[in-house]
Image (tube, rainbow, N blue to C red):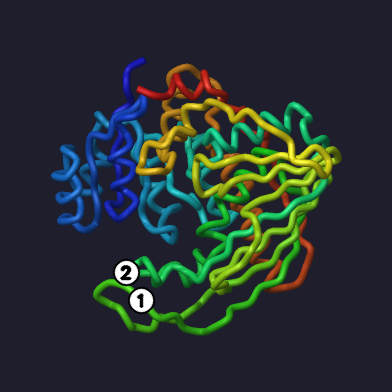
Amino acid sequence: MADLNVGLIGCGNISAAYLRLAPMFNGYKITTVADIDASAAEARAKEFGVGADTVEGLLANADIDLVVNLTIPAVHAEVSKSILNAGKHVYSEKPFVLSLEEGRELAALAAEKGLRVGSAPDTFMGGAHQFVRNLIDAGTVGEITSGTAMVQSFGMEHWHPNPDFFYQPGAGPVLDIGPYYISNLVQLIGPVKRVTGFAKSARTTRTIACGPRNGEEIPVGTPTTLHAVLEFQSGAVITLIASWDVYAHGHSKMELYGSEGTVFVPDPNFFGGDVRVTARDQARDLTQWTHPFSVPNDAEQANYRGAGLADMARALAEGGAHRCSLEFALHVVEVMTAILQAGDTGQVIDLTTRCDRPEPIGPDAAEQLLA
């Protein structure tokens, strides 16, 4: 199939990963980058040997089929609308919208234009998480009845030189890191039925600990610790803790408890990792899956950012669904915003969206996405 010509809007930190890893995949090539800061676009273009343009120029470029939206979350919906209105498919970084209303508006516009919307994260397509999917679907640990998901650290200001937006509405640990965890839960055990939870912040300001602003205090405008309970349509009940107020803890990233055993799931923020399983209360030997998206390719990490974009390109060429679909991403957004609402009100929130679990992607299907 012919490669899609892809443009990229937003030349911040994450753009380097997309540009660096794009040559690994079939189905698309990034030809042009743009940013409201022309110097940022020019620097990225020079670094990776692609073209630079204004945002308006990129959207008017008839040769570009799809645009990757790497702007800040607060303007994801606005920028994605402009991409759709320019007659181009859009693939957005997470979360692709910040509210159910924005997502439904984008869905209606995409349907009207006959265009597709895709959204990160695509880490659930990683070999480790697809191995867990294979084990669950095969009934290896029986029916998943409950579990835990824990994403806890002491925040972003220790490594990010400009962490302000992480601590404002539209971010926080649930909307920033939660997409990885909730997307993986939904692809493993299905859609969520209802949620409840509690929220707080340990402090009202944070102190930047790196870069040129080292020592500067920034305000906190969104909860930084959230404890949630998710009831799934399947009946499974999962406890999710998302916090940037924790210096140290001893919890696994994700554990799923089945009627016949437990599966220990590696960090959903990454594509690879070791999977452990028990047969009831006894450790069970596993032959780890040989999967293309488990192979370390970025120092010691398996990093296949762009797999979801390659899968979307495949679906556009061949027909059928793409795994990082609007419907899937919108359900995850509703779960996250419902957690925030529950944390604010103490209510149990019934969800209104549904989605199918994305199709699993085994080793052969993954290999076809690679160049």
Residue under pointer 2: 161
Q: Is residue 90 visible?
A: no
Residue 18 placement, left or right of 308: left
Residue 32 placement, left or right of 172: left
Q: Which of the pair 126/309 is nearer the observer?
A: 126
Residue 65 placement, left or right of 255: left
Residue 50 position within the rendered picture, expressed as x and y whole percent measured from the top left: 18, 37
Q: Which of the pair 70/18 is nearer the observer?
A: 18
Residue 311 placement, left or right of 329: left
Q: Is residue 145 above or below residue 73?
A: above
For the point 58% across and 81% down, the residue is 202
For the point 55% across and 32% down, the residue is 323
Q: Secondary structure at mark 1?
A: loop
Q: Secondary structure at mark 2?
A: loop
Q: Is residue 355 above or below residue 172?
A: above
Quadrant (top left/top right/bottom left/bottom right) for the C terminus: top left
Q: Quadrant of residue 201?
A: bottom right
Residue 175 position within the rendered picture, expressed as x and y whole percent measured from the top left: 54, 59
Residue under pointer 1: 209
For the point 75% across and 26% down, the residue is 138
Quadrant (top left/top right/bottom left/bottom right) for the N terminus: top left
